[in-house]
Image: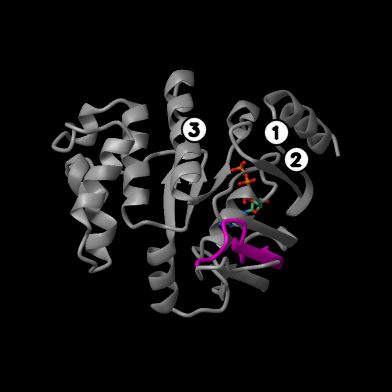
């Protein structure tokens, strides 16, 4: 694949995350392979959903892809660089530079304002935050004017939008989202999914999202299905109906 366009930036369809034959077991996991030889790539500017029955390895895949966890074997490439074998602190540096996270439980600090939550990862990394960009991402997620609020004053959907602004503040190449709508009502969930879609389309950030919800997966460009630590199926241009059908087939295996 042509990895560069004519002006030297990585092409939009270049892979930003690539796993090759990744195996992961947990020390206390009774020898179960949480990932059993997974090869999958996620392109720049694409929105992917990861689905599969409970225990199929979705979170483990996300953790290995994001450099939060190390595979036993196989390779994990982030923006073309092997991170599976990278040692600290180089790994943390790569992750902070290139990766954003959104979790089901928001992971905001209640003692800090929206503004300080958004800037916190960069402050912890010792990077001077780009405050203009932080203001812009807060506006993009629809929270302009709420900068001084504490998370406790916000709804679940608003909290998740703060988490998204925080993920975007460092201009990551990829955002990993682990059930970002799992704790939200339907309308707030849709808003967050719409924002993730917009981030992909307007900023070219890749989004890799674990979800159990076929309607959420339908916002993605592609769905990959895991079962027993293996990638068993994938679906391009998903609809909620097609995703639900495939999930039934995967669960019946
Ligand atoms: N820290 C751990 N220690 C031991 N085993 C683990 C650990 N984390 C996950 N596992 C095991 O690895 C396998 C994959 O788990 P993982 O959490 O990745 O699946 P999942 O698809 O994300 O599940 P869920 O949908 O329930 O969140 C399961 O068998 C699980 O029990």
The residue sitting at the right extreme is 253
Q: Secondary structure at mark 3?
A: helix
Q: Position of residue 49 (x, y in %)?
A: 62, 42
Q: Spatial distance from mark 1 to mark 2, Cα to Cα?
A: 6 Å
Q: Is residue 54 visible?
A: yes
Q: Position of residue 168 (x, y in %)?
A: 36, 50
Mark 1 and 2 residues: CB-CB less than 8 Å, in contact?
Answer: yes
Q: Secondary structure at mark 1?
A: loop
Per the rendered image, the range of residues in magenta is 9-27
10 Å crowding of disc 2: few (<14), some (14-19), many (20+): some
| Residue 22 belongs to magenta span | yes
Q: Nearer the viewer, residue 44 or 88?
A: 44
Location of residue 236 with respect to 174 vertically, above or below: above
Mark 2 and 3 residues: CB-CB less than 8 Å, in contact?
Answer: no
Q: Spatial distance from mark 2 to mark 3, Cα to Cα?
A: 18 Å
Q: Position of residue 218 (x, y in %)?
A: 63, 31
Q: Residue at x 70, y 36 (%)?
A: 237
Quadrant of image for the C terminus: top right
**Quadrant housing residue 19:** bottom right
Q: Which mark is residue 235?
A: 2
Q: Residue at x 17, y 31 (%)?
A: 145
Say whether residue 153 is left or right of residue 61: left
Q: Which mark is residue 122?
A: none
**Quadrant housing residue 73:** bottom right
**Sooner in the amino-acid sequence: mark 2 or mark 3:** 3
Q: Residue at x 50, y 37 (%)?
A: 197
Q: Position of residue 138 (x, y in %)?
A: 27, 40
Residue picked out by circle 1: 238
| Residue 44 belongs to magenta span | no
Residue picked out by circle 3: 193
Q: Secondary structure at mark 2?
A: strand
Say whether residue 113 is left or right of residue 1: left
């Amino acid at each position: 694949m042509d990895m560069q366009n004519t002006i030297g930036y990585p092409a939009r369809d270049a892979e930003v995350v690539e796993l090759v034959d990744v195996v992961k077991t947990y020390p206390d996991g009774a020898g179960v392979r949480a990932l059993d030889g997974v090869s999958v790539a996620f392109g720049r500017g694409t929105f992917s959903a990861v689905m599969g029955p409970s225990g199929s390895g979705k979170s483990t895949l996300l953790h290995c892809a994001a450099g939060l966890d190390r595979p036993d074997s196989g390779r994990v490439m982030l923006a073309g660089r092997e991170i599976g074998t990278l040692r600290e602190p180089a790994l943390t540096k790569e992750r902070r530079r290139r990766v954003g996270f959104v979790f089901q439980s928001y992971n905001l600090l209640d003692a800090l304002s929206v503004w300080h939550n958004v800037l916190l990862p960069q402050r912890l990394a010792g990077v001077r935050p780009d405050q203009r960009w932080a203001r812009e991402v807060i506006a993009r997620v629809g929270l302009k004017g709420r900068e001084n609020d504490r998370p406790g004053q916000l709804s679940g959907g608003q909290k998740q939008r703060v988490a998204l602004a925080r993920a975007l503040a460092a201009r990551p190449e990829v955002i990993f989202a682990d059930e970002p709508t799992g704790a939200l009502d339907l309308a707030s969930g849709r808003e967050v999914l719409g924002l993730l879609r917009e981030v992909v389309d307007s900023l070219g950030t890749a989004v890799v999202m674990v979800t159990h919800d076929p309607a959420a997966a339908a916002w993605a460009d592609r769905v990959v299905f895991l079962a027993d630590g293996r990638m068993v199926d994938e679906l391009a241009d998903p609809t909620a109906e097609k995703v639900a059908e495939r999930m039934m087939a995967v669960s019946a295996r």
